[in-house]
Amino acid sequence: MTLIQKKIRGLTADFKKLLARLERDVTPKDVHHLRTTIRRMESLIGYTHPEVGRKQQKAIDELDSLRKRAGKVRDLDIQMGLLGEIGNGSTAEDRRSMMEYLKARRHRQAMRLLSDIRDIDHHKLFPRLGKISEKVDGLAPDGAEALPLAQALAALREMANKAPARSSLKAARMHEMRISLKRIRYTAELAEDSEARQQFLEALKPVQDAIGEWHDWETLLATAEKQFRGRVNCPLLVEMRALFSAKFSSATSAVSRLFAKFASPEGRKPSAAAAAPDLARPA
């Protein structure tokens, strides 16, 4: 059995266990794992490009819908966590008010996620996922385990070569990069375990963390601006805007360092690519 075959079967088994646990309790940890498990399943299916029928495509669409529903709960879990990090005493009353608002929204979204999970027809979904798994098996020949890392490295180099200077990085472009880097990471994770794979993922992690934190603060700030839209000088908004600005600066700096490291010799930053070939060689 190839590594790709093991991964798709393992992910499907994890997905089934998560659904069972979430039916009992919609915990932040399991919601997060549900999202990432589905993301990895989608990435693997996208990487192998199996030909699927109408019913199998319906199963893929069902996964996508469930991931998005879980994402709504996850976003609120993150927002509540960030709100708890603000310690400015002058914001205490507004923080309490906003926390209650977020908890109420989280409860509603959790109930919707639970409803979607309970509506799943296991007798249809899992056999269809099994059919997709069989098709993935047929597209995963022995010896192909190193290809995902090479593809991920090529995609990252292409991003690095096309990226604008740090001073030109805007929010919309950062959002595109955030999504693209996620896809690159999930593709790299499909490769066999090696030192090169580990180095590549370790290079991506701090950048994804920095962009993710910026995005999370952006989401929280947008929620707060709606909640306190009638108060221009609300202390909580002032505090959040300062934190959001700092997170954006950290994110653009992290992205610029990553791209400087991985740009190819013929690309935008020829002097920064010396370390990249090491990641392309299997350990």
Image: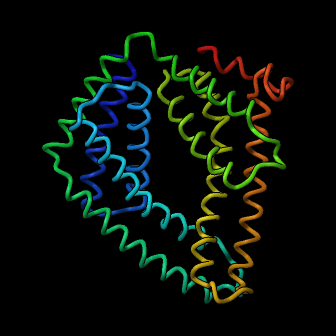
Q: Is residue 258 left or right of residue 155?
A: right
Among the 4 quarters of the image, the one containing residue 51: top left
Which x, y percent locates residue 23?
25, 59
Q: Is residue 195 left or right of residue 256?
A: left
The residue furthest right is 271
The quadrant of the picture occupied by the C terminus is top right
The residue furthest top is 143
Residue at 72% across, 22% down: 276
Residue at 15% across, 42% down: 124
The quadrant of the picture occupied by the N terminus is top left
Q: Classify 89 as above or below 183.
A: below
Report the number of numbered marks. Answer: 0
Q: In this view, does 229 lie to the left or right of 29?
A: right
Which x, y percent locates residue 222?
61, 71
Residue at 63% across, 84% down: 229
Which x, y percent locates residue 242?
77, 70
Q: In this view, does 190 lie to the left or right of 41?
A: right
